[in-house]
Image (spheres, grey):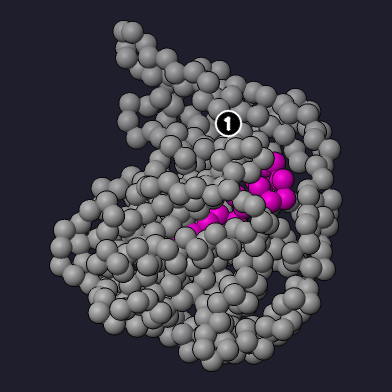
């Protein structure tokens, strides 16, 4: 599970599971052999390749399911990736009655369709799989830790890794399979990106959890790009990346080594409390919770070093209970790093693992990279500027890197104010419009004033848009053309009445 994107919204969508296209096991082993991961990892290369071969059957299973086999109630197949290089998306987003072709599949548009060209242009970029990108470095460091630390009795890695699953999922995968309530805010068009009423760009990698459990996996990592409509500032972007992990335990695995463990049980019928689910024994819950927190403490120590102060905050996620957020003390302040918890047994049971109990956690790669490498602006992850990228071309993935800031070009600030339409307006609609037109020229957008007319009761919003190019100085005239396009599009597409 993962930390929510908005700190103020504790019960919003969370990180869980990412993605991976189907590659043959020998191709994955070859990819691994060419990674610059340092001498420490080479000793486990053979084990990694074995694990990847072991996962091949699971990938074939998932590929077949993605081609059209239903996974559960109202669960339609998700999009597959193209077999030949081509643009990720075609068609006119938002045109009712039209279609959008994305990753080799066509999706009819309807009243739910709300994808912008800007967001569609990010699909298929897969920054987490781009060698020497900072997100790739974080992913590889986590993989290295799990491959070397958690080994099965056979001497092979315990965790399988999936990092290229299609980001197109069904609403059943993204919400229903994870027990997200029908009235949960995350289902609204203002929060998520929909291709149509039944398909969407995943809002969290947790959308793949049910499928992987159903395929028979009991320990895995998943990494991928996820999509959410959100505010515009240096910490938020509509496309970001998550890394998730799940581990299930049988009764024998969980109680092995525990005194009188043979007399302990995983399940019981009791009542739900803040400490456990109604179907779990307290002993089983506490052991799973202990293993989860120990696993995460080791991971953070691997990433940040010894002497790290950690605290756990109780929270709520629809698919775990009890649930926690992990915070670390870094440079004198507490930072929320990830979300985690004991998996809801209803979810585990529905995926066919009724005799097991487990934990899950998820984290945002951008958040970790910004903290570890001191990267100040989330837009930098999409930069092609060699001054940025070359700083992460290291021979050893564990080598310490401190980002050296690029010359910061001056900002150009423009305000826009308008009367809102009587209905069907959300702030995220405006943020999406600004992103679509201004792209990465827009550093942030702040709502600086709200006004309600005392007689007409109409509401006016005033936004301050900060424009700043990452690689050169922009003139007010150049920015003025972009800003005018924003004004005109807001009137035409959002139905606002301009006050400019």
Of residue 271 and residue 191, the one placed in the foreground of this image is 271
Of residue 77 and residue 117, the one placed in the foreground of this image is 77
- In the image, is residue 455 above or below residue 305? above
Q: Position of residue 238 (x, y in %)?
A: 54, 48
Residue 435 visible to an observer of this rendering: no
Side of 150 where 64 appears, left or right: left
Q: Position of residue 210 (x, y in %)?
A: 36, 71
Q: Is residue 378 magenta?
A: yes
Mark 1 surroundings within 10 Å by alpha-carbon count, few (fewer than 14), some (14 through 19), many (20 or more): many
Q: Is residue 285 magenta?
A: no
Question: What is the span of residues highlighted in magenta in the rendered image?
Answer: 361-379
Q: Position of residue 266 (x, y in %)?
A: 27, 73
Q: Disc 1 marks which residue?
A: 445
Q: Residue at x 33, y 26 (%)?
A: 422
Of residue 225 and residue 431, the one placed in the foreground of this image is 225
How many marks overall? 1
User: In the structure shown, which secondary structural element does the residue marked by tag 1 occupy?
Assistant: strand
Q: Residue at x 40, y 35 (%)?
A: 426
């Amino acid at each position: 599970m993962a930390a929510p994107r908005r700190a103020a919204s504790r019960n919003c969508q969370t990180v869980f599971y990412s993605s991976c296209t189907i590659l043959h096991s020998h191709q994955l082993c070859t990819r691994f052999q060419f990674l610059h991961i340092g001498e420490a990892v080479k000793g486990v290369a053979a084990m990694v390749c074995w694990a990847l071969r072991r996962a091949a059957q699971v990938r074939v299973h998932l590929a077949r399911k993605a081609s059209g086999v239903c996974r559960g109630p109202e669960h339609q197949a998700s999009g597959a990736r193209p077999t030949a290089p081509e643009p990720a998306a075609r068609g006119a987003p938002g045109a009712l009655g039209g279609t959008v072709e994305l990753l080799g599949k066509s999706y009819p548009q309807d009243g739910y369709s709300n994808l912008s060209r800007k967001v569609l242009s990010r699909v298929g970029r897969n920054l987490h799989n781009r060698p020497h990108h900072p997100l790739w470095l974080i992913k590889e460091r986590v993989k290295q830790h799990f491959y070397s630390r958690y080994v099965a009795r056979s001497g092979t890695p315990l965790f399988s890794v999936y990092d290229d699953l299609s980001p197109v999922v069904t609403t059943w995968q993204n919400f229903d399979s994870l027990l997200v309530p029908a009235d949960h805010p995350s289902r609204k068009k203002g929060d998520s990106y929909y291709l149509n009423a039944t398909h969407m760009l995943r809002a969290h990698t947790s959308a793949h959890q049910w499928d992987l459990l159903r395929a028979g996996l009991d320990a895995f990592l998943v990494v991928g790009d996820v999509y959410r409509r959100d505010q515009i500032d240096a910490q938020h972007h509509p496309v970001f990346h998550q890394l998730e992990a799940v581990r299930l335990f049988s009764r024998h695995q969980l109680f092995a080594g525990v005194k009188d463990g043979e007399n302990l049980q995983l399940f019981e019928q009791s009542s739900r409390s803040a400490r456990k689910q109604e179907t779990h024994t307290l002993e089983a819950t506490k052991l799973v919770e202990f293993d989860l927190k120990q696993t995460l403490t080791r991971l953070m120590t691997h990433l940040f070093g010894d002497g790290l102060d950690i605290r756990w905050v109780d929270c709520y996620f629809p698919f775990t209970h009890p649930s926690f957020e992990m915070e670390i003390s870094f440079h004198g302040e507490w930072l929320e790093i990830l979300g985690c918890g004991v998996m809801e047994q209803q979810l585990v049971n529905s995926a066919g693992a009724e005799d097991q109990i487990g934990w899950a956690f998820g984290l945002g790669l951008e958040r970790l990279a910004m903290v570890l490498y001191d990267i100040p602006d989330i837009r930098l992850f999409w930069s092609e500027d060699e001054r940025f990228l070359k700083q992460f071309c290291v021979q050893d993935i564990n080598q310490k890197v401190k980002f050296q800031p690029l010359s910061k070009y001056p900002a150009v600030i423009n305000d826009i104010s308008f009367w809102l339409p009587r209905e069907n307006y959300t702030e995220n609609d405006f943020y999406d419009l600004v992103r679509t037109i201004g792209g990465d020229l827009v550093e942030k957008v702040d709502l600086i004033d709200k006004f309600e007319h005392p007689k007409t009761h109409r509401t006016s919003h005033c936004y301050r848009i900060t424009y700043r190019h990452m690689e050169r100085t922009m003139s007010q005239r150049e920015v003025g053309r972009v800003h005018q396009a924003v004004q005109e599009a807001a009137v035409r597409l959002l139905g606002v009445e301009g006050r400019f």
